[in-house]
Amino acid sequence: MAELCGLKYEDVQVGQEIPSFTHQFDRMDAVIYAGASGDFNPIHTNPYFAKDVAMLPDVIAHGLFNMALLGKTVVDWIGDPGYLKKLSCQFRGMVIPGDTVIFKGKVREKLEGNLVVLDVWAEKADGSDVLKGGEATVYLP
Amino acid sequence: MVDHKWIGKTYGPLKYEIGREKMREYAAAAKDNRPIYHDEEFAKTTKYGDIIGMPNFAAVYALRGAGMVLLDQEIKLNLAMLVHGAQEFEWFTVVKPNDVITETGKIADIYEKGNLDFVVYEGEARNQKDELVCRSRATFIIRGG
């Protein structure tokens, strides 16, 4: 059996940062995510609607797209997607085409039952918030 | 202000059949090409035996009730002023191709803070074996009260 998770609960330290994931948002990302998710709100896909009707600077990334990249960042660390037990976050900053977003996590607490709680968040290159107050709970063997 | 009488209003049951290519499409859209989401031959060598859905794929199979809240013609939320403020998913098992998910949900809370209205949806997704797959909690914020 191929083992997906290369981490061990006892090897994880409180305060440890997990590898970050960096993504530069492109307007095609939102078109593809709209199709995949079924969320066709034009603020994500139609720049004329976004600017002229919704008074936004441009189309903006789906919050749930950003959250999915946050989930990917945690799963990149743990290896086994089935070990991600909980993920939450607040949607704060808008992401427009060309913005670079960095997804991050840091171990907050180790619980009984081989559970590890992380603070997770996403910010732009200038440090402004994209996803804030996030929390991930993972199981580690 | 959103009338508090809608707290407790239920949505569903909503059925969703998990499709193999839809799982792959979602993972690819979320920039995740790990083999366990895409490659059946690889998946057969793991404990899962088949590809599994990316956890965040719950945005598709466990939030359809939230979409119904937004379009609820009795409540008539002001969509022009509405943003998705926060989201929480809790997973209990993985999803695989051909799983049939049943989502039931409710408006768990409505409250105000300053001139912001908050509407909270909570949903529960179960598979064809009646196993709990995912709990979701979506918080929507309506500006301007």
Image (spheres, coloured by chain):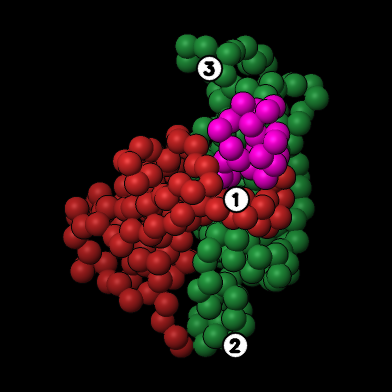
Chain colours: A red, B green
Location of mark 2 (residue):
B41
Give the spatial CA distance, label 3 vs label 2: 50 Å
Q: On what subunit does the disc labeled 3 rest?
A: B
A113 drawn magenta: no
Location of mark 1 (residue):
A27
- Compared across the picture, whether A25 is left or right of A138 comes to right
Is disc 2 in the same subunit as disc 1?
A: no
- Compared across the picture, whether A36 is left or right of B110 comes to right
Residue drawn where x is 51% and y is 80% of the image:
B47
At label 2, counting other C-alpha atoms closer than 10 Å, the crowd grade (few under 14, some 14-19, many 20 or more) is few
Closer to us: mark 2 or mark 1? 1
Residue drawn where x is 59% and y is 87% of the image:
B41
Closer to us: mark 1 or mark 3? 1
Give the spatial CA distance, label 1 vs label 3: 30 Å
Residue type, label 3: Leu
Residue type, label 2: Glu
> Percent position (x, y) of residue A25?
51, 52
Q: Earlier in the sequence, mark 3 or mark 2?
A: 2
Q: Depth check: A108 or A30 in front?
A: A30
Q: Depth check: B11 or B139 in front?
A: B139
Q: Confirm or deny contact between disc 3 and disc 2 (CB under 8 A).
A: no
Give the spatial CA distance, label 2 vs label 1: 33 Å
What span is in magenta? A42-64
Q: Depth check: B103 or A58 in front?
A: A58
Residue type, label 1: Arg
> Percent position (x, y) of residue B117?
56, 18
Location of mark 3 (residue):
B116
